[in-house]
Image: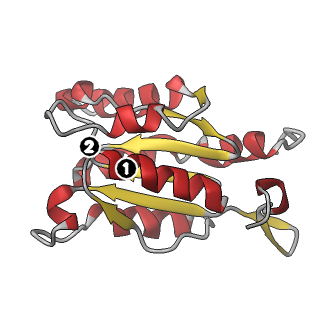
Amino acid sequence: MPPLDALPCLKMNDIAIYRAQVITVSTRSFKGVWEDTSGPAIVEKLKSWGLDSPMPIIVPDGEAVKDALQSAVATGFHLIITNGGTGLSPTDLTPEMTKQVIERDAPGIAALIREYGLAKGVVNSSLSRAVAGVAQKSLIINFPGSFGGVNDALKAIEPIVLHALEQIAGSDHLRRG
């Protein structure tokens, strides 16, 4: 595999196309007990923002999350979103696994998502232990697993995610408008 520096974002008509991987963290979905609906919804929204994203992968709670994150980073995905495993349940270990992969924290992103939910009156968003950070040239963001939490998280990050990806890629931070 070529080094990450050799895997810049794709260019189409001089417009950057960033690649995103969604990782659904759900032991029940992994075992086929129930269908993952949040992961595909994230992929569709990312595509509407112009990001290239395959269908989500599904992993069980625990060490498999770390393995999937490391694989996505090594593959060169610019944005990696996990959904699920961020609550207080004993099996919710997504933040712990993410912390083992990220090299630099981006706590404002996780705080933004929690604050968005709280502003809507979703008091349970305060129970999220989600984290965000950068590993190599990948931005990793933990989302909640619920469909409503995913929708709120997407709305919260929409205004900032492309600029964050530009910063990680080392852009000149050109002003828009």
Quadrant of res 74: bottom right
Which quarter of the rendering shows the N terminus?
A: bottom right
Q: How many marks?
A: 2
| Above-or-below relation of 127 to 157 | above
Name the foreground residue: 139 vs 177: 139
Q: Residue at x 54, y 68 (%)?
A: 48
Q: Secondary structure at mark 2?
A: loop
Instruction: Measuring from the top left, give residue 68's x and y in whole percent.
Output: 44, 56
Instruction: Measuring from the top left, give residue 14's x and y in whole percent.
Output: 88, 68
Q: Is residue 77 visible?
A: no
Which quarter of the rendering shows the C terminus?
A: top right
Q: Nearer the viewer, mark 2 or mark 1?
A: 1
| Above-or-below relation of 50 to 72 | below
- Residue at far left of view: 33
Q: Secondary structure at mark 1?
A: helix
Q: Residues within 10 Å of mark 2 (few under 14, many from 20)?
A: many
| Above-or-below relation of 38 to 143 | below
Instruction: Measuring from the top left, give residue 161's x and y in whole percent.
Output: 60, 45
Q: Which of marks 1 and 2 precedes in the sequence?
A: 1
Instruction: Measuring from the top left, give residue 46's x and y in whole percent.
Output: 52, 63
Q: Which residue is mark 1?
A: 65
Q: CA distance from mark 2 to mark 1?
A: 9 Å
Q: Is residue 20 left or right of residue 18?
A: left
Q: Residue at x 74, y 41 (%)?
A: 168
Name the foreground residue: 99 vs 34: 99
The kind of residue on which mark 2 rests is Gly
The kind of residue on which mark 1 rests is Val
Quadrant of res 47: bottom right
Q: Are marks 2 and 1 in contact (CB under 8 Å)?
A: yes
Quadrant of res 119: top left
Q: Which residue is mark 2?
A: 85
Q: Residue at x 50, y 74 (%)?
A: 54
